[in-house]
Amino acid sequence: MPTFRPGLVHTPVTPFKQDHSIDFDTYAKMLEFHLRNGADAVALPMPEGEDMSLTDPELRKVLEFAIAQVKGRVPVIAHVSDAGTALAVARAIHAEKAGAAAIVSHPPYFWHPKPAMVVEHLTRIGRAVGLPLFVFNPPVESAGTPLTSETALELVERLPNLAGVVDSSFDWVFMAEVISNARRTRPEFQLLPGAEFIVSATVLGGGGAFSPLSGIAPRLVRGLYELCEREKFIEARPLQEKMAALNHAVKGAGASGLKDGLAGIKAAMTLMGRACGVPRPPVRVLDEAGRTAFAGAIAGMTFLKDEPQGW
């Protein structure tokens, strides 16, 4: 199988109407925005796309809609995570039939299976299709069983279509162990950061990135990515610090002290003139005090004035 290198992957949010139904008109504008503003590929619906709040028919419709809208201009990577193996396998098979270029999957959602069960779950997903598979290692605060270097390397042995690991744990020891050991048997194995902390992952030998904040600051993300690809890490550091400030503000946004990055991403996009509705429950929208504080934080980030306004 030819090596599939996704590059800078934008991970769009899912826009909703007031009744919480999917706003496909806005979704079309959003996808076009990402394609105009530096996306080498799109992956959807990822956690920032509220995949866990979408029904199975909605998940399939979102993917089909995106593939039809993109029309082959960039690869579409289908996120097929689920709590049950059969459910995730069915989603992977649907993604391949729909025309996805690759799939990405977390370990099982919502529970903590043993490492051997995680390996079996992901192996069955990968073997169900002929597409490249990226395994996503979730943030430490997320539910589920995180990957270890041992489980990741066992997957390399069992899955010839395993293209790499997308890591959001930012456990640098894990990342270094996986990439150095996996490449001994599979030189094309890839390590991609699952957020915009690109410098450190690239120094370790990674390449590409999944970008949840590309709907807010695509030019900043693209500039950071390109400097890292050219190994200009000193020049990239100021951009990485700006990205870290934006990430901190988004993660800290929430209603009545409840921090939630989903609310923060959509609130920031609205402040940039790209309204995409509010998250579905149980995610809570920002209350008045939260909106005021968050708007002040975003206004203080003068580097966002260089970003596109509106769609």
Image (cartoon, rainbow, N blue to C red):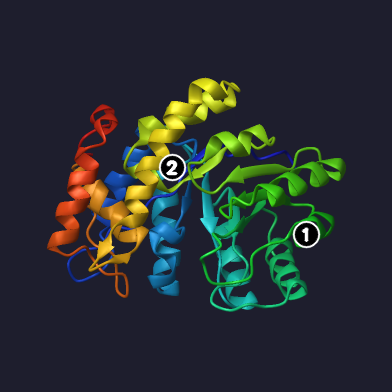
The residue tagged with tag 2: helix, strand or loop?
loop
Position above or below: 229 against 62? above
Position above or below: 257 against 217? below
Q: Residues within 10 Å of mark 1 (few under 14, many from 20)?
A: many
- Residue in the image at 65% along x and 37% along y: 206
The quadrant in which residue 198 appears is top right
- Residue in the image at 41% along x and 51% along y: 66
Position above or below: 284 against 104? below
Q: Looking at the figure, which quarter contains the C terminus? A: top left
Q: Which amino acid type is marked by label 1?
A: Leu
Which residue, given by chain and number where applicable, does mark 1 sit on?
155
The residue tagged with tag 1: helix, strand or loop?
helix
The quadrant in which residue 156 appears is bottom right
Please report whichever mark, 1 or 2, sits nearer to the chain's N-terminal start: 2
The quadrant in which residue 18 appears is bottom left
Where residue 229 appears, x then y in whole percent? 58, 26
Where residue 283 appears, x then y in whole percent? 31, 70
Which residue, given by chain and number where applicable, does mark 2 sit on?
71
